[in-house]
Amino acid sequence: MGSVQEDFDGIFQHMQEYKIIVCNRCVFALVPQQIDRHLREHHPQIDKQNRSRIVERARTLEAVAHNKEDVEYPQAGEEPVEGLEVFKDGPQCTGQQDGNPCEYVCRTAFGMQKHCQCKASSSISLRTARETRRQYLLEQRGVFHSDLWG
């Protein structure tokens, strides 16, 4: 067993610019409250004692978001965060926020529906989310848009 910092650094990378912690093995961004569960579910080989030490280290980091709302997300058009996978298959919100287009993008239709409900986005974006979810579910079942409409 190494030092707490060595154990933490062996699994995670603290990206202060974005206020996130990234799991090096899973290439997944986390906030400190998610670390314990992440380690239990994705790294069960780490014993409880070491897991507790790593979790405590994450909670004491400076320049880290302690909830998802405090994460510093890259702006639209900026380069992707180095080291994190870029997904190009998620829906983008088509609603307006303070008179400007909403730039929210996520991986799933469910995530978009949740966003639209939380942000009270326009009915257009909620409809788009529902249509996207329907399309996603149909594609999961092997039914594609062209199969339905010719």
Image: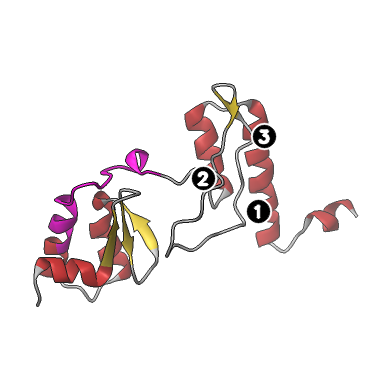
State the extent of the magenta-drawn residues as a range: 54-72
Foreground: 68 or 41? 68
Answer few, some or many: residues within 10 Å of disc 2's Cα (few below 14, many 20 plus, some between 14 and 19): some
Instruction: State the residue at coordinates (17%, 71%).
Output: 7
Amino acid type, label 1:
Tyr
Asked if residue 94 lies left or right of residue 28, the reply is right
Q: Residue 55 in magenta?
A: yes
Identify the mark at residue 111; answer none if there is no mark: 2
* Residue 25 position (above or below residue 56): below
- Residue pointed to by mark 3: 127
Task: Give the left or right position of residue 125, taking residue 145 as reference.
Answer: left
Q: Which residue is mark 1?
A: 136
Q: Position of residue 127 (x, y in %)?
A: 67, 34
Residue positioned 44% across, 57% down in the render:
81
Q: What crowding class fits label 3: few (fewer than 14 Cα within 10 Å), some (14-19), or many (20 or more)?
A: some
Q: What whole-number distance in Å separates the C-alpha atoms at marks 1 and 3?
A: 14 Å
Secondary-structure class at tag 1: helix
Q: Quadrant of residue 82?
A: bottom left
First-in-chain label (1 vs 3): 3
Residue 62 shown left or right of residue 78 in the figure = left
